């Protein structure tokens, strides 16, 4: 699996659950944070600027192996399907190259006020196609 964008993910003490591994919600938090940090840092998204925003309409995660605090992990990000108003993000949670989980988020871009779908903004689309389409 190739992920053009890799982001470090530091596990925290409170991420472990009673079973001694990272709780499943932590994986979703890591993926959601990676997507939005990339959108803001590389694609120019301003979530408070009044322009279109991406909202999650679907997400999933398939777990392959466990991780636990204090392991340092990475989140890989790439774009799958890029439609008119939506993008399917494909993600991997990795430990030293080992795939621990595969995730998928679908974001639909919407008008910030009406929450009605709008086309992916040109600058964001260009950044996705430039940086994340494999």
Image (spheres, rainbow, N blue to C red):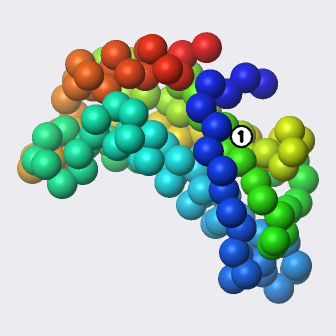
Viewed as shown, does residue 16 lie left or right of 8? right
The answer to whether one can see residue 103 in this image is no
**12 vs 132: above or below:** below
Viewed as shown, does residue 114 lie left or right of 29? left
> Which one is nearer the viewer's eye here, 94 or 57?
94
Image-quadrant location for residue 90: top right
Viewed as shown, does residue 68 lie left or right of 56? right
Please tell me which residue is depicted at 44% across the width and 15% down the height of the picture: 129
Location of residue 63 in the rendering, given as x and y in whole percent from the top left corner: 81, 51
Location of residue 93 in the rendering, given as x and y in whole percent from the top left corner: 73, 46
Image-quadrant location for residue 15: bottom right
**133 vs 110: above or below:** above
Please tell me which residue is depicted at 78% across the width and 80% down the height of the picture: 17
Total marks shown come to: 1
**134 vs 47: above or below:** above
Quadrant occupied by the C terminus: top right
Quadrant occupied by the N terminus: top right
């Amino acid at each position: 699996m190739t992920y053009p964008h890799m982001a470090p993910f530091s596990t925290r003490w409170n991420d472990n659950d009673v079973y001694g591994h990272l709780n499943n919600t932590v994986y979703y938090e890591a993926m959601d944070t990676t997507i939005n940090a990339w959108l803001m840092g590389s694609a120019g998204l301003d979530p408070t600027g009044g322009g279109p925003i991406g909202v999650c309409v679907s997400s999933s995660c398939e777990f392959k192996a466990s991780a636990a605090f204090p392991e340092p992990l990475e989140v890989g990000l790439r774009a799958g399907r890029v439609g008119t108003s939506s993008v399917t993000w494909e993600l991997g949670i990795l430990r030293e190259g080992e795939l621990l989980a595969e995730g998928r988020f679908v974001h639909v871009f919407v008008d910030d006020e009406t929450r009605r779908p709008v086309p992916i903004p040109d600058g964001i689309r260009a950044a996705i196609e430039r940086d994340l389409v494999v």
